[in-house]
Each structure stands twice: as structure tokens, then as C-alpha cells.
Image (cartoon, rainbow, N blue to C red):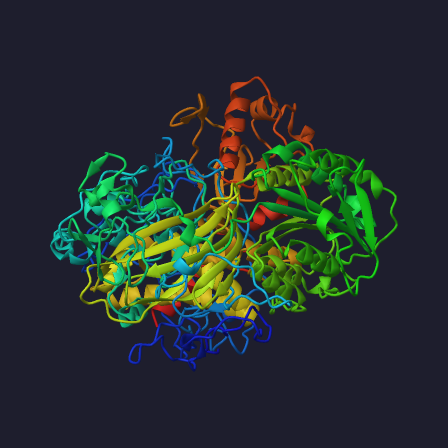
Amino acid sequence: MSSTGFNSQNGPGGQPYANGPLQNQVALQPPGAGYNMAHHPPYNPMQAKGPMPPGPGLYNSGPYQPIPPVSSYQASPGQPMLNRPPMGPPHPMTPPQSTSPCPGPRMPPAQATPALPVSANSYYQHPPAWQYGALPLMGAPPPMGAPPPMATPPLAFVDNHVTSSPSLAPPQASSAGYSAAPPPVYHNAMQPSGHPLPPTSLHRYTQPGHIPTPANGTQVPNSSDHLETAPKMAGPPQQPAPPARHMGLSYPSLPPGYQNTSASPMQAQTQPYSHAPQSYQQPSAGPAQLSPSLAGLSLQSQTPETLRVVNLLQERNLLPPGPVTPPTPCLPQDLQKINCHPEVFRSTLTSIPQTQSLLNKAKLPLGLLLHPFKDLSQLPVVTSSTIVRCRSCRTYINPFVTFLDQRRWKCNLCYRVNDVPEEFMYNPVTRSYGEPHKRPEVQNATIEFIAPSEYMLRPPQPAVYLFVLDVSHNAVETGYLDVVCQSLLENINALPGDSRTKIGFISFDSTIHFYNLQEGLAQPQMLIVSDIEDIFLPTPDSLLVNLNECKELVQDLLKSLPQMFGKTMETQSALGPALQAAFKLLSPTGGRVSVFQTQLPKLGVGALKSREDPNQRASAKDIPNLSPATDFYKKLALDCSGQQVAVDLFLLSSQYCDLASLACISRYSAGSVYYYPSYQQQHNPAGVECFQKDLKRYLTRKIGLEAVMRIRCTKGLSIHTFHGNFFVRSTDLLSLPNVNPDAGFAVQMSIEENLVDMQSVSFQAALLYTSSKGERRIRVHTMCLPVVNSLSDIFAGADVQAITGLLASMAVDRSVTSSLSDARDAMTNAAIDSLTSYRTSVLTIQQPGLLAPACLRLFPLYILALLKQKAFRTGTSTRLDDRVFAMCQLKYQPLAYVMLMIHPALYRVDDLTDEGALNISERAVPQPRVQQLSVEKLSREGAFLMDAGSVIYLWIGRNCNPDFLTQVLGVPDYAAVPQNMNILPELDTAESQRTRAFVGWLREQRPFFPILHVIRDESPLKASFMQNMIEDRTESALSYYEFLLHVQQQVSK
């Protein structure tokens, strides 16, 4: 396969764009070249490996003795992830069936599963050993044997659409806030509008470059100078590592001799992150001189729990009893208490390697995951005429700087010594003078400043909302127009804004319709432009109006719009010209365009043709047409970005719409994509409810306007690739015409200079935006992580969920720029390479089996789950738009929701009790334990709920307890369960209240609304439910155990 990285072009598949990103030296290096590391090129998982001999066919099934690895890493307490529902206690351990090694039955050649097709760019130089032919059904023991040889190229997706030198990427945040306490406000600052809510389901794609200049040669000024001067930026976000746990359970498809031995359960890490800002006494030395403190944390005589050796072939039940928590960085307690919360800012590695060569040797990706504009219940806000920043690198003062004395502080990113301004000597909280280290800016890793006038190049823009509505015959048939107009009527007073807020409407079919809403008119006036080849604005001054002054006209229009087109026979859709009109209308002010589209646009500029072959949906080969068919939508998005206009796309269609092309309008303008397949008001009430709830959240959530973001990192680190929805301006500044609280971002990093003299490094994300109330604000997040010089310490700090989330974004880019098979191979090699490095470089005693450190014990399971995810699966019928939307979600959703998409949570709910329940708002919320995703865990006598992020399934067993059917579903027996049941009836029974409380609690954990499907054996959706049983074999994919055997064979070579 090819060892080259991603091309430095503006998006997948297109030619470099004239106004596109600057190509940096990283992107322009020849294959195999490193990132400014002459002797140690970065580890590239996409590079092909040489052929490897087949591994041994015998796997030790006897009792497993943990091998103590050499490590000086101090295990640190875990931190709870607030988004993911707690998981229950482990299954009882199965006693050992045999104490001697027992070779498994070999697979006769005739029964060998056929090899997967291998592309020229495959990770493997030999065909993979995964064969998809006539496979035994679930329940019958599949024949086992040594899979065919498979070469495994290194696992690193090195580049993305956006490759730029030191750049920044926005942070991801989750739905939970820091604290329930009211946010402190300093100097009469206002708290940001908007209430804490979790992020929405939107992807972010990466895009480098500078802002295009509009046709008239002007560019909307943006007060980003103060953020554009920093040389360095932070890397990709980190994900939580699950607490390790020994559980022995037999694989149902294996003979008794393969049953596991039991092992002692692992102690779960329990220390939580602090949820509110805590007082912090600045240490005399500061993070850069922490060697004595860090040395004291090393325990040579004791192996940390995160490095406990786990034999994955012997331990079946690896899911933790509670939420998978991110690892706690090994920092002194006073620093750790004030570190940035992992739901806002996290790294794939919580221990940063000293050198790029050491990082390459670990074969783990280094990056940051960010949720920068997350709704927070605790956000300190500071108003000050002086915002203290480093004079050299422009870093904002933060808890990890060092005060040399009262008058001087040393930057924790570039180490320059700066003077403390006189104003900063006064502490507004204690009203005392002479203690700058106790100021709020130095006590909180997340803080927001109300910016003074020098952070503005023009008056802050007002909130401007433009709605662009498809009113063709197809659109009217779906009934979506009624829902949109009704939702706007209900929420028009809740739209974020102030007295300057403006609103406008455009509708389109084969022509473009504008609406004159000028004050003084008796009723709205529709103006039709039929010349879609040369679009113009008929009355530019009266199409966008002040919402407060013209509210009655707006309400009249919303009430009449659905009827105006009720009998239309226009079938065409001129989406491109409608978007051009929207751009012309919003260019003078900037703002948000909300586009509602129901079919493939076939008229005017941007017209598209169907590229999907329904007969190829289940192809096991590469999937074509994942890249855009035209660059029209991308170029228009770049023009929009230059004028501070973001475009959000709502796609409601049962037909192919070429989302791969249409999504570019949102991806490069920092917008969002919403997709509702098979939307129909009459026949799909569940889809209508989901659309209504999502739309209400969309209309009322807080919004940041004309925003820019930069990520800075300590000298020696460099950011080279961004993931998300944005445009990269001036190599390292993310342009975000709109920023919303549901958007996540990721960045990849490399180590350009050795960090040998450093004990810790810091990362800072700064988001400069205009609030809907017209205030210029700066939200700053700072994270500090230790630097280590041993592989064992790197592995001990690995965050398995953050790693999985970053790899998913990298794989999406690889799928678009190269091929789906390349992306699948790269993900598989990620697991193989990291476990190979662990086996050869960390373990001191070799032993048969597939060995992993406890912190990475879920890594192969997550990789297999990604391979079976809608975005990357092959051999299973998947509509092209469904696949592309899944890729979008992986790119721009915050990590907590991405992980539910990748590895859903399964609960048994027919026996819910109040034992261990959470008490939320005076109601008890049951906490059932999480089950493994295998049919083996289902029971015909039970009812099982699967939370897959955007959808929740409630599967009813054929012999389910009649009490559950009566008291929860309100039906007398199994046969009476309706085929299309999407709502749990409100029954006055304890069982009904528990079940509804649990489902409601799950839904409250996220900003989007997951549909509930009650299914039984005869339901059409049963197949979708079963496809999420990741650990089971299908006709086109391996079971979890077979995947482990394949990984072990490659690791053992």
C-alpha cells in the first residue's frame, strides 16, 4: 500500500483551491519524510510492511499469570465521564476449565474462510486472513486455525484534508457541566447566554487555507489579530481509557477447553475530576520545573493498574462495571485539581513522549480532542481592560504559568519572562492587592474574558438568521414545511439575539422566491426571480428585517407559507441559485443560513446527478463516490466563510441526494449537517418527533458569531492536521463564522524538538467570538500534561477512547482521499502495531496469547466496532447518503456521542430495580449494568435496551415476562406489541416509571433527540438492532474472538 500521507488540498478529491490553505513543509514532504525530524520520521500507520510469516496456530487457554512489566509510572485515579451512563457490575467469573495449554482445532483448508479482497493500497501485502464465505451460524463452534499470513503496515493516518503547520483546532466538550453552582462573574461581567446542554450530532471536517476574498475584493473584517500571532498550537484531543478489569467468561462458540480462567477483578479508579474551580497556591517552581514532584510519584516497586497485563484471548468480559473513564495525568495534586476538564479538552496520550522517535516507537497517535463552546454550568467570566498575555507567543495567562515574583511571570509555552501589569495586582474576588497568583485567570483552566475594544475591527455583528426552504412538490409531500413554520412560531422569541436581530426567508423550486417583510406592509410580499442563471436581489433593503420591529409580518408569513405551496406541481430544485442568493443577502452582515432540502438538486449551478448504484450497496469492494461530484458547494462555502456566513443543512429525503457533495456547503463554512432519511409526516411519526426536537434545540441554543480559534502548545510540539467543520486561515487559525455548543474538533500533533529538559507541556485553545448579545468574548481552555521518557509510561497514560475517536476522524479522511479499504486496513493496523510495540518493547517476559496493558484492553474491540460501523462497513447493504452522514457524525460530534455510535450500550430492562439508582430531580433513575454486544447476552425471556447514540432500540423477547408487557408497554401479550411503537405509554406502575425514567435520562445526556424503536422478532428494524451486536460473526465480518486471533497472529510475527 502507499506510504504517502494525506494530500494538502482543500478537501477530498478536489484540485487545490486557489484561495485554499497554505501548504506547509509537513504536507509537502516526500513519502516517509518526517515532520521536521531528520532522524526520526513520524510513525505512519499507512506505510506498508513487509510480508510476515504465519504465526503459530496454538493459543494458550490455560490459566494466565500476569507478567509484571517494567514501569516507573504511577497509576493515577480515573475521572468519571459524565456523558456515558454508568455500567453495572461485572458478570460472575467462570472458573477455569483446564489448567494446561490446549491447542485449538485447526480449520481444514476446505473450510477456510475466503480472503478479503486487497487493494493495491491495502495495508497488507498479502491477502488478509479474514475470509467471508459460508460461515457457521451463530451458536455453532466456528472452525479455528491460524489465519493466512497478513502483512500489516504501520497504523498511522498521517494527514488529513487540512494539513497546515502549527495550527489550531477547536475543543470538544460533552454534555455535562463543571458544577451546578452558579458561574462566578467578575467585574460585573455578564454570563454567556444559553443554558448547559450537550452537543449535537454534527461532524466536523478539516479544511486548511486562508479566507477567500469575495468578488468585490472586500473582506468582512474580523477582530482576530490577537489570536493570530501565536506560533504554536495544540494537537488532537484525548479520549478516556477504560478502567481495566479481569473477568473470565467462556466464548460460546468455542469448545469447553477454550473457556477462560478467572482472574481477580481490577480495582476501578475512582478519583473524579474536580467539578468547580478550586483554590490553587502557585508552587514556587511551576510546571516546567516539576522534576522533584514527579519523581516522587514514581513507584518502581509497584506496577500501575493501567499497565496490568491482560491476555485478551482469555478474558472475555472486559467492559468495566462503570463508565469508561479517562486516565488522570500524572501531575502533582495541586496542578491536577485545576487541570482542564476532559470533556472540554483531552489528549490521546496523557503522558507526552520526550521525542518523536519515542512516539513513533509506541505506535500510538498523538492528538487533542476539543469541545471549545460546550454548554457549561460553571464558567468564570472576567471583565478587565487588560487581558494579560505573553508578549512573545501571545498565550493567555493561566494556572500553569510560573510567578518568579509578584511582578514577573514565566510563560508555560515559550518560557519568556513577562511583567505583571499593575491592574493585574488587584484581585477582584478577594478585593486584595499584591497576590496576582490568586486572580481568577490563574485559578481556572477554563475561563471567559469580555474583550476590550482592541479585540474588535468593526462593531460586533448582530445575530442574523436566514431560512432557505425547498418548496417543490416533493418537499410539500413530506410535510416538513408545517413543522418548520410551527417550530419557528413557537420559538421565535427564544432565538438568541438582541434588539438588532435580523431575520429573512427565501423559498425555491425551479425559481427563487424572496419575501418583502418591510415594516408598514399589510402583509408579506412574495417576489419571484425566475432567472436562476444570473441571480439578483429584487429589493435588497427589505428582505432582511429587524425581528422585533417586523415580528407580526414574520408570524403572518410563517402561518401562510405551508398553504401557499400546498398544490404546487413544480418538481425541480434549484438549490445552487438559492444558496447564491442567500450569500448575496448575508454578505454585508454575516450570519447563519438554515437550508432545508428534500431532493437531489438538478437545476442551475450546483446541479447534481445520481451517482449511487443500489446494486452495489452491499459491495465488499471499495465504495465509490464518497468525494464531492462538484467543487461548487465547497467554493461557495469558502466565499461564505470570508463574509462570516455559516450554512447549516437539513436534508429530509427518502431518495439519494448526494450528501457527499451537498455537505461541503456546511463543512467549510463551519456549519452543521442534519439528515432525516425517509422523512414523511404521515408515515414516519418517530422521524417527525426527532426533527421537531432537534429543530427546537437548533433554534434556541446559544450561538457564537464571527469566531476564530487557535490552539497553542509548548515549544517543541506542533499541530499538523485539523478535523472538524471550519476553514483554516493563515495556516493555523480556524475560521468559524458560527460556532455552536454541539460541535467537536480534533487535531493531530507531532514532536518537532526534543522535550528532554521539560517535565510538563501545556496546550491552550482560545476561541474569540461575538455573542448573540453583541459582546466580543474570548473563551480560553488550558491543559497541562507530564513529559515522560519511557514507553511503559506512554502506554500507562494512553486514553483508549480518545485514541479511537481520533482514529475514526483520520479514517474518514483516508476513506475520502484514498479508499475505504485503505481506511479499514489502517484501523486494523493501529491495533496490531500498538500491541506489537507493547509486546516487544514494554513486556519483559514473553508469554503466549494476545497481551495488552489494561488501559488498552478495549482497543481491539473498539477497532472491530469501527470496522462494523455504518461509515466503514462492507458487505452489508448501506445507502451511500447514510454512509456519508455517519462519516460526518464521526468528524464533528463530541467524543462521548461518537463512542456510543461506535460501541452502543446494551442494558437488560425487564428487571429494573431502584438498587444503585441515581436520584435526579426527585426521581429515581435505575442504573442497569452494561451487557456485551452479543446475541449470547440476549434472552427470549427478557427485554433489552440498546443506546446507539442517535437511536435507541427496545428489543422484546418472544417469551418476555407478561408483567413487563402489561406494566411497561400496556399490551396484554407479545403478539399485541405494535409493529411501529416509538413511545412508552405513561402508565401508573412502578415498572413504567422506572423504564421511562431510564430512557428519559439517557436522552437528556445529549443535545439531539434519539428515536426510540420498540422491536420484536418480526420487526423490520431487527436487522439494524442485530448489526450492532459487534462481538458476533456476520456473513461479511469476523466475530470479536476471530478478530483477536487475527490480531494475535500479526503481533506474534
Task: Give the residue displayed 27% in from the left and 35% down from the top.
Answer: 429
> How many numbered callouts?
0
Q: Nearer the viewer, residue 263 or 918?
A: 918
Residue occupying the point 76% across, 37% down: 520
Q: Position of residue 556 (x, y in %)?
A: 76, 35
Q: Is residue 1038 left or right of residue 674?
A: left
Residue 286 horizontal/vertical position (percent): 18, 53
- Residue 479 is situated, as x and y percent measured from the top left of the image, at 77, 41
Find residue 13 and report its image quarter. bottom right
Residue at 61% across / 46% down in the picture?
A: 464
Q: Is residue 155 left or right of residue 1003?
A: left
Residue at the bottom extreme of this rendering: 30
Residue 1018 visible in the displayed image: no
> Against 52, is 844 above or below?
above
Q: Nearer the viewer, residue 212 or 54?
A: 212
- In percent of width and height, residue 248 lies at 34, 46
Front-lying residue, 773 or 958:
773
| Quarter containing the C terminus | bottom left
Task: Please say whether residue 194 is visible from this viewpoint.
Answer: yes
Q: Is 175 in front, or is 452?
A: 452
